[in-house]
Image (tube, rainbow, N blue to C red):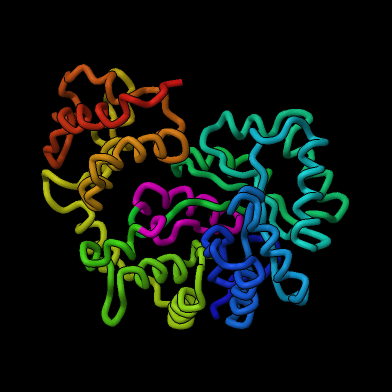
Amino acid sequence: MLYKKYGNTGETVSAVGMGGMRFDMELPLEKSAELLHYALEKGINYFDTAPQYHEGKSEEIFGIAFQQMPRDKFMVSTKLMPERITDAADAYRKVCMSLEKMHVDYIDFFHVWCIRKMAHYDDAMRSDGLYEALLKAKSEGLIRHIVFSSHQQGDEVKKIIKTGKFEGVLLGVNILNFPYRWNGVKAACDSGMGVVAMNPLAGGLIPQNEAKLQFLAGKNETPAEAALRFLIAAPEITVALNGFSCREHIDTACKVADNARPFTKAELKKVKDNLGEGATSICTSCGYCDCCPKNIPIVKYMQIYNDRVLFKIPEDKLQEHMAFQHQWGLLAEDDSWAEACIACGRCEKSCTQHLPIIERLKDLAKWEKPLNKK
């Protein structure tokens, strides 16, 4: 197993982490807990969960396993959303509930969870709020490091990094979205923070579409293995967080870590070229279209359209896909919707690939039309 320093904390963590939201919930909790034991045997020492994972059962599964694991051999991470607490006392109580569920005396990394827009960060930092409770818990030895998780774009993540309030960050970054997420990764790394990458396989899209994504892979590896290698071997990434539902998944990730070789510039160029090949298909996110008089985030919308092109999302799933993007994904920070397009043509005139942006925005507007625009 490859090990790395977690930022400036002095902690040493495995380059592969185990996330707690991919268990087979048809199995008894004790059976799922055995996976943590196996992961530890394979050298994984970073375990991440949250109170809501698997309808509240994930922390319980962790607790079953942790009672039989030497406490000095593993590190545990969990989370709280600012919007799910009423005040600092409520947050502190929920920290204690996590400790009790997982049968541990302290939590190594506690996340301000799921910052999707700056308003969520402001909510966490308010007086009598979540961050205040975490500071209290840390002063009492219940938490060792306060960190945060974000679904924001790189430039937005950098604003939080610059506050100096956190020691690490959990980001949704993978081999498909790194061109527009990597500046946040680099900013965190350069500031001395640990960087944990979630969704390394794009929520399962990569292994489910390996034939279409074969260009990701090097010699003697699958696209999924290449995606794991991209993060595990990257010096800017501390932990590649994987959800495991069986021992074979653990074996695969650990095998990649044991033989991790960073992507070369040529390999990265190949990935970027393939993701952006075809003047009428995939947007390369160059950003020249950022000139909309209606402030429509065109680059983000074109990335979402990429998903349709790359993964052939069926018509009956497009509304669900758009809902996710507005609540959790690329569009969570934005108030302008695709329907605001006035077809002025500025974006298309600026597009170096001559993409039919106006037509794509019309399609996107249809997909998001049924959504509640709050």
Residue at 69 percent of width and 56 percent of height: 109
- Compare residues 51 and 241 and report the one nearer the observer: 51
- Compare residues 287 and 95 and report the one nearer the observer: 95
How many numbered marks does the figure carry? 0
Residue at 24 percent of width and 20 percent of height: 341
Quadrant of the snapshot with the N terminus: bottom right
In this rendering, position of residue 127 left or right of residue 340: right
Residue 60 percent coordinates (x, y): 70, 60
Query: Is residue 45 part of the magenta span, yes or no?
Result: no
Residue 204 percent coordinates (x, y): 38, 59
Question: Vertical placement of 44 versus 75: above or below?
Answer: below
Residue at 78 percent of width and 50 percent of height: 97
Residue 144 percent coordinates (x, y): 77, 57
Question: Vertical placement of 338 versus 213: above or below?
Answer: above
Residue at 28 percent of width and 71 percent of height: 217
- Compare residues 73 and 250 and report the one nearer the observer: 250
Q: Is residue 164 visible?
A: no
- Compare residues 364 and 257 and report the one nearer the observer: 364
Query: Is residue 197 part of the magenta span, yes or no?
Result: yes
| Region rendered in magenta | 177-204
Residue 163 percent coordinates (x, y): 64, 40
Question: Vertical placement of 100 versus 157: above or below?
Answer: below
Q: Is residue 34 visible?
A: yes
